[in-house]
């Protein structure tokens, strides 16, 4: 492992707090570590369902929030 790859790996491990932000298209996004989640259409009111941005490629990772607090998380990604 090179010094650069170790630094990148450490950066992704240290960033574990979710960051609620907006995509370039104006849609809500959660950034958690090195992964991004988009809010699903079936989100109603304060309850939100979020899927990994790579769900079209088969990733099944999801987050469920209530008032922007994570209440459930399936953090099983099939990619880096």
Image: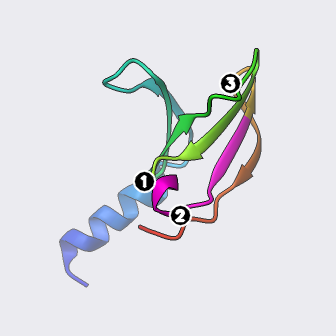
Q: Which residue is mark 3?
A: 68
Name above or below for residue 39 compared with residue 57: above
Crowding near the residue tagged with mark 1, few <14, some 14–19, many ≥20 C-alpha atoms within 10 Å = few
- The residue at which mark 2 appears reads as 58
Give the label, 2 or 3, closer to the camera: 2
Q: Is residue 52 left or right of residue 76?
A: left
* Residue 42, x across and y down, in percent: 70, 29
Residue 60: say if magenta. yes
Whether 78 is drawn above or below 53: the answer is: below
Q: Which mark is residue 34?
A: 1
Q: Nearer the viewer, mark 2 or mark 1?
A: 2
Secondary structure beneath dot 2 equals loop
Quadrant, the N terminus: bottom left
Secondary structure of residue under mark 1: loop
Mark 3 Cα-neighbour bin, 10 Å: few <14, some 14–19, many ≥20: few
**Does the CB distance between marks 3 and 1 fall below 8 Å?**
no
Q: Nearer the viewer, residue 8 or 45?
A: 45
The residue lying at 75 percent from left, 19 percent from top is 44
């Amino acid at each position: 492992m090179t010094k650069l790859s170790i630094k990148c790996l450490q950066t992704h491990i240290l960033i574990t707090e979710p960051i609620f932000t907006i995509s370039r298209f104006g849609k809500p996004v959660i950034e958690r570590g090195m992964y991004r989640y988009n809010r699903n259409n079936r989100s109603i009111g304060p309850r939100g369902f979020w899927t990994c941005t790579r769900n079209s490629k088969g990733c099944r990772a999801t987050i469920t929030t209530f008032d922007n607090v994570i209440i459930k998380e399936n953090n099983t990604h099939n990619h880096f």
